[in-house]
Structure formats: structure tokens, C-alpha cells
Amino acid sequence: MKTAIIRVGRSLLNVVYSLFGALPTKNRIVFMSRQSDHPSYDIKALVSFCEDRDVETKILCRKMKPGAAGALAYGCHVLTQLYYMATSKVVVLDSYCIAACLAKHRDSVKVVQMWHALGAMKKFSRSILDMKEGHSSRLANAMGMHENYDFIFTSSEASRPAFAEAFGYSPEKLTIMSLPRVDALLDGQRDESVKQQIREVYPQLADKETILYAPTLRKNFDMTEAAEKFIEAVDFDRFNLVIKMHPLTEGSIDTGRAIVDRKFSTMDMFCACDYVVTDYSAITYEAALKGLPLFFYDFDIDEYEGERSFYLDYKAEMPGFMSRNASDIIRAIEEGKYDKGRIKAFADKYIEKQKGCTEEIGNLLIKQL
């Protein structure tokens, strides 16, 4: 029943798209995302690059909210997406997009997928169909999951097979391009500016070393207990603790001693921290690129491997101390158990291009016009 409704909706969507297609086309690049209601650093950097070269751009960012009102609002947003896709020449995505994947595009329209994660660690998208954290394969096929891409970016040769599997394309279809955020992550001048902004909000971060705890999103899982165990293990006389939970994470975190930040991005918070604790998050690639000491609090590793799994050998490749026990992680931080050489080797393997990334992608997009 559900797939039959989707087929009808897909047909209606393409009728509307064909009507918009009768309108004049502009030399315009449209950036679309459902990761947030606000553009990511990557989108803003590319828009700035293109507009500096007198190329017209349009940003369409909206998260899909729950409930009938959310569905109605997103439906109206899809109509806006259809209009701008039909009247632009390049469409840039950083996530799955209903309109872009269901529409029948003219040959002159180029669709670019620059996935929002810098690398592929835990399996996602088409790799986890019919698994606990994934969608059903029947629904994914009906919704055209990741169809219609002309370009797909991956950050390295090592990541090419993972991204190919996740999107359902042959490996040679992928292009090695690092996201614009790589330029920012390696910009020392930006580091100092962002650090100052963070310390204006949290002046206590200047007094002690800071641990950043940024776990991955777990669907239908309450993170309260795991986070509280980590908080209990920290010696607050010696360290600050900043917690960056994914916006969709379930559970409430004690804010009495730790800073549960919602003002800055995780990428920005790297500028003000001394140690990064994560688990299966793709922020590992970003932290490694910055050379930050990495530690892995993998309290549910056995369950996670069974329910979702990884593209790489997690236990062998993660560039840092790992433990299911929060106290072990803090002790390792206190004892300086990290290897800068191993962290750099990991970053170099999975992020091949480490400068001029905004310019390279920007020029590719403009060339499609």
C-alpha cells in the first residue's frame, strides 16, 4: 500500500517538475540539504566561492519535522526545490533529497552529491537496508534512494568502495574530492579566531585542559546512562568537559558540571579542546586531520557491530585508545596514551586532498554551467 502511494506521488512530482521545466533556465547552482534548517560550512564556503565569481546560487535547507504540520511544511518545501531544480543547471546535495532523487531531470541538469561526512566509518544508507538502523529495501527503492547522481564525492581511494556501496554506484563513478571544511580545519588563523569566540561564551575553558565528548547518533537509544558514566569518570579539578550530542540524540544530560554545548558546531569546538572522545562518529576524520588526541568510548561495541557494522576494521584502525569503560578512557587521557604519528597516518589515508578543497569543488561546479 505504502509503495503504491509513493508511485502516485512520484508521478505527480514529475508532472509538477515538467511544468516548471517550461520556465527559462538560469546559469544557477542550487544547494539543497535536509541536514539542518541552516547551511553547513561546506555549503556556505562554496556559495561564497561561486558568488565571488559572479555565479548565481540558491540555498534551500530544511529539516523534515515530525507530525502532520511538519510533513505539510516539507511538502511545500519540495515544491520550491522542484522549481529551483527545473530552472537551474547544477544541483548540489549533502544528504538524500526526495525531490532530486525522484525527479526525471533533463540531461543539462547535473546533480552532485557531496555527502555531509568527511569519511565513511559506520555503514549507512543503502549499506544498511533491512537492518535495525536502516530503511527497508522496498521503501528505499520506491523512494529512489540516491538515484540520479552525476557526481559523487569521496575523500580518498580508501573510502571509494564504502561510498560506492552506500549510494549503490560502481566505484569508478566516484570522484575524489575533500569537502571545503578541510580548508577550515587546517587554517590556523581561523582556529585562533574561533577559539576566542568560544572562550567568550565559556571563559572557564581557558583555565584547564578541555575534553570534548562527541558520540555518534544511535537511533532509538537513550544516551543518558552512558553520558552520565562518562561525566562521573572525569576529574573536574583537572579538566573541563564539553559534550556535543547529535541534535537527534535521545536522553537528557546532566549540565551541572559538564558544558552541554548547543551554540557551536563540533568542528568549531575542535579549536578549543585538547582531547576528543568519540566512538563510531565520522568526526574522527576531522579530529585526526587536526592532529587532536583521539580516544574511543565504545561501551556498546558488540551490539553496534552486530546491528550496523563498519566499512573498516574498527578495532584495528581507530587511531587511539579504546575502551567500554569510561574510567579507562579518562585514565588514558591523564597518562597521555596517544600516538600523534598514528593519528596523522589515519588522516592522510582517508583524506587525500588537504588544501585548496573549496576551490577545486567550486571550479568543478562552475564548469558544469
Image (spheres, rainbow, N blue to C red):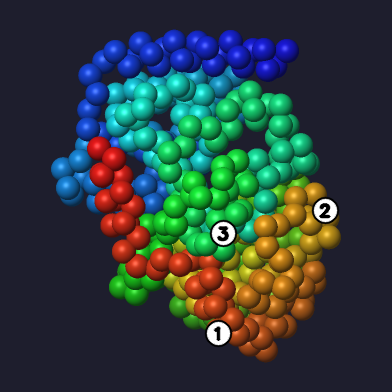
Q: Identify the residue at image location x=32%, y=29%.
A: 108
Q: Secondary structure at mark 1?
A: helix
Which numbered dot is residue 341?
1
In 3D space, how far apart are the residues under numbered discs 1 and 3 (Cα atoms)? 21 Å
Screen quadrant of the C terminus: top left
Find out whether the residues at labels 2 and 3 contact each other: C-beta distance under 8 Å.
no
Residue of label 3: 159
- Whether residue 43 is visible, yes or no, is yes
In 3D space, how far apart are the residues under numbered discs 2 and 3 (Cα atoms)? 21 Å
Within 10 Å of the Cα at label 2, are there few (<14), some (14-19), or many (20+) other Cα atoms? Answer: few
- Viewer-proximal residue among 273 and 62: 62
In 3D space, how far apart are the residues under numbered discs 1 and 2 (Cα atoms)? 31 Å
Q: Identify the residue at image location x=49%, y=80%.
A: 207
Earlier residue among tags 2 and 3: 3
219 over 287 or under it: above or below: above
Q: Which three-letter amino acid code belongs to the residue tagged 2? A: Gly
279 over 344 or under it: above or below: above
Q: Identify the residue at image location x=34%, y=22%.
A: 86
Q: Does 299 sit left or right of 100 as displayed?
A: right
Q: Position of residue 68 (x, y in %)?
A: 60, 19
- Viewer-proximal residue among 262 and 96: 96
Earlier residue among tags 1 and 2: 2
Within 10 Å of the Cα at label 1, are there few (<14), some (14-19), or many (20+) other Cα atoms? Answer: few
Judged by depth in the image, the label closer to the viewer, 2 or 3, is: 3
Which numbered dot is residue 306?
2
Q: Which three-letter amino acid code belongs to the residue tagged 3? A: Ser
Q: Secondary structure at mark 3?
A: loop
Q: Position of residue 46 (x, y in %)?
A: 31, 49
Earlier residue among tags 1 and 3: 3
Q: Position of residue 295 (x, y in %)?
A: 66, 74
Number of marks in picture: 3
